[in-house]
Image (cartoon, rainbow, N blue to C red):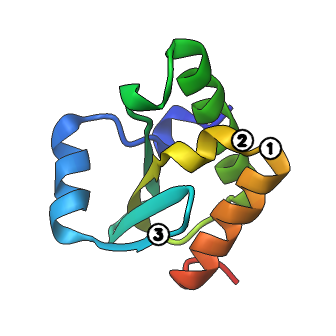
Amino acid sequence: MLKRVYRLTKHGSFGFVYRKGENKASAAFSLFYVRSATFRIGFSVSNKLGKAVVRNKLKRRMRAVIEDMLPLPNYQMVLVAKHKATELDYQAIKNDIRGLFQRAKLTG
């Protein structure tokens, strides 16, 4: 489980990252990020992607991938799932997110 200290939770914090940050996208995810004093990440899965079971499963998988990637550099980030993400299994989600972070130059 991703520790609470690493989570971005407030609506205003999400808005700040969307407005001020840079973004990278893949077929299944979009990543918005802005430099910060500490690492924090939020996850966004729209109601349009499915019912609660589908959305929660996707968020659990996204959190698990990020937890495996820790430690990450000091940025505030928002990881947004697209419709394509609902069709992927865990390994494909992991590869997609890792590729997204590498393109954004946020990991080695």
Between discs 1 and 3, the one toward the N terminus: 3
User: What number is the disc on residue 100?
Assistant: none
Confirm whether residue 81 shows in the render. yes
User: Dot 2 surroundings within 10 Å: few (below 14), some, or many (20 or more)?
Assistant: some
Q: Secondary structure at mark 3?
A: strand
Which residue, given by chain and number where applicable, does mark 1 sit on? 90
Distance from the alpha carbon under mark 1 to that under mark 2: 9 Å
Percent x, y of residue 73 = 53, 72
Q: Nearer the viewer, residue 83 or 16?
A: 83
Q: Earlier in the sequence, mark 1 or mark 2?
A: 2
Left or right of 21 in this view: 98: right
Foreground mark, 1 or 2? 1
Where residue 20 appears, as percent x and y from the top left, is 17, 69
Compared to residue 25, the image places residue 102 above or below, namely: below
Query: What residue does disc 2 label?
Result: 64
Residue, far top: 52
Say above or below: 66 vs 102.
Answer: above
